[in-house]
Amino acid sequence: MDALIELANEDCKVSFELTGDGLSLENIYSIACENQRVKLTNDAVILQKIKESQEYIENAIIGNNKIIYGVTTNYGGMANFEVSPAEQELLQENLIWGHKCQLGEPLPIAMIRAGMLLRANSLIKGVSGIRQEVIERIIRFLNNDMTPVIKEYGSIGASGDLIPLSYIAGAIIGLDTSFKLYYQNNIINALEALKILKLFPIKLRPKEGLALINGTSMMTGIASICAVKAKRQFKLTQYIHAFFIQALNGSSEPFHPFVHQQKPHSGQMDVAKKMLELLQGSKFIINTTDDLSRKYNNKLIQDRYSLRCLPQYMGVVQEGLEIIENKITIEANSANDNPLIDTIQQISYHQGNFYGGYIADTMDNLRHYLALLAKHIDVQISLLVTPEFSNGLSASLYGNKEGTIRHGLKGLQICGNSIVPVLLFLGNHIAHLYMTHAEQHNQNINSQGFASANLAIKSVDLFEKYLAIALIFAVQAISIRCYEEFQHFDARIGLSKKLIPLYETIYAIVGKEISRDTAFINQNHEQSMDDDLEKIISDLKTNDGKIWNVLMA
């Protein structure tokens, strides 16, 4: 323990000031995934509002004898039972104990950090009746990389994420040693955490337990990170398609601005513009100004649908991801517990802002969009490996031109084919599959937002693996196309300028030199594809990985 105490990071470099508003998904991602530090605003107006909302609760139960849900009454279907003044503080503590029943695999630390961040941000809005001291505790734990252990099962997303958030609440107040946290590659208990931070356990006041656990913060935190990752993956998918189009001797004609001016969906136009940018300068594609005899030489006059309809297909996904980002951003900057307090009018409102319907919808759709992207890539790969459809590429993209042993990427395609059906399965919606009788029929509609977000973690992670497969196909296919047209394998001679850095980066990641004499994968026994895949996946998982740096340049 003493060694751990010395490691406590009390002097944090702050990168973001929390005000209850203005958090973007990129902010959330940076704080959660890159351990950037935050601080509570010193804005006097915001801090006064926090104080007044907590005073409203104190005054209501002491001087005015108001009946307030979860403060002077029991919870949910037992809200008809009043709680005596002597037991109102114990009611808050008991609420946390009553929801200490999570199950399943632990969630990734970054996802939990995002949930902690958003719980604090919500409470800072000053409508939840909680002390500033309690909010500051969440921030202190966050800044010192102390992350409660939270698991994947427990929330139905109706009254928010009661069970997952109860583990944050129990940890920060030091309720019991059974509340565990990740810290410095160890697992410690809540009282050890307080000792490291030089804090003491605190007793919750009326409403504070409810304010801490009654909200959508965990599902929204997960959704925020998944949405940022999906946005990056979408961008990489565009690059991969640009490789495929060049490898297939495709045409730039379907991306001409004239076409999309006639059907001006914003996503469709953006994708078409991006594809022209990624294909510019390529010697492997057919432009509308080229000699059309190249098209008619035993080839279709137009590309197959997966190439020709690419803007129309991916435009839908781009617009969908933009809608998702907007909805999650609003939720992340919302007050989402019950009741909410209007300190100006001195009224508390019993309502349902804790309902996670927006997150359930966005995460259902995000998984659907990732499934669409994977299916689209899979169709392109099937063209690349089949000589009847590839415009002259070798069968299964074998690289060696000598000898008779030719396996190529057969196995890799099979591996990809094992992943796509799972992504398609995960693309099914869950939000409509809620139980109608939860908690004495009180939570008789529930969002399944937490479940949907957890499934999105799986989809994002699995699609990341599939993108690694697609990148190997992309580099292999373009090197073979280069050989067919220029009699060597260094595709930089004909590849569009925008794709050359990514082409070079994939070679560098797997530790292979670009060669004029051999394809990316020449003979299968010369390099281990699973090792290559793991190296690419590892880079994709790194927030500032080589691949992302190329895409952001």
Image: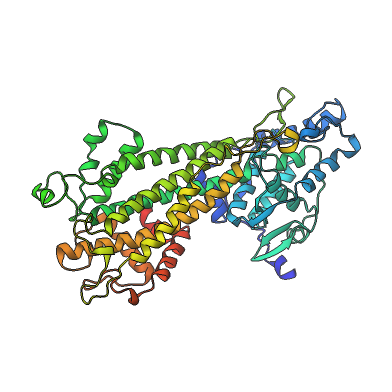
| Residue 15 vs residue 380, the one in the foreground | 380
Q: Furthest-top residue in view?
A: 345
| Residue drawn at point x = 35 percent, y = 68 percent | 508
| Residue drawn at point x = 27 percent, y = 61 percent | 477
Question: Where 210 falls versus 38 (above or below)?
Answer: above
Is 91 on the left-hand or right-hand side of 421?
right
Residue 172 appears in the rendering: yes
x then y, percent, for residue 238:
34, 49
| Residue 191 vs residue 514, the one in the foreground | 514
| Residue 267 vs residue 305, the one in the foreground | 305
Q: Quadrant of residue 74?
A: top right
x then y, percent, for residue 273:
28, 42
Is 545 on the left-hand or right-hand side of 330?
left
x then y, percent, for residue 471:
35, 60
Q: Quadrant of residue 445?
A: top right
Q: Quadrant of residue 179?
A: bottom right
Is 503 on the left-hand or right-hand side of 462?
left
Is 426 on the left-hand or right-hand side of 181?
left
Question: Where 413 falls versus 442 (above or below)?
Answer: below
| Residue 326 vs residue 384, the one in the foreground | 384
| Residue drawn at point x = 44 percent, y = 44 percent | 369
x then y, percent, for residue 545:
43, 61
Residue 329 appears in the rendering: no
> Which quarter shows the N terminus?
bottom right
Question: Where 126 falls versus 99 (above or below)?
Answer: above
> Which quarter shows the C terminus?
bottom left
Number of numbered markers = 0
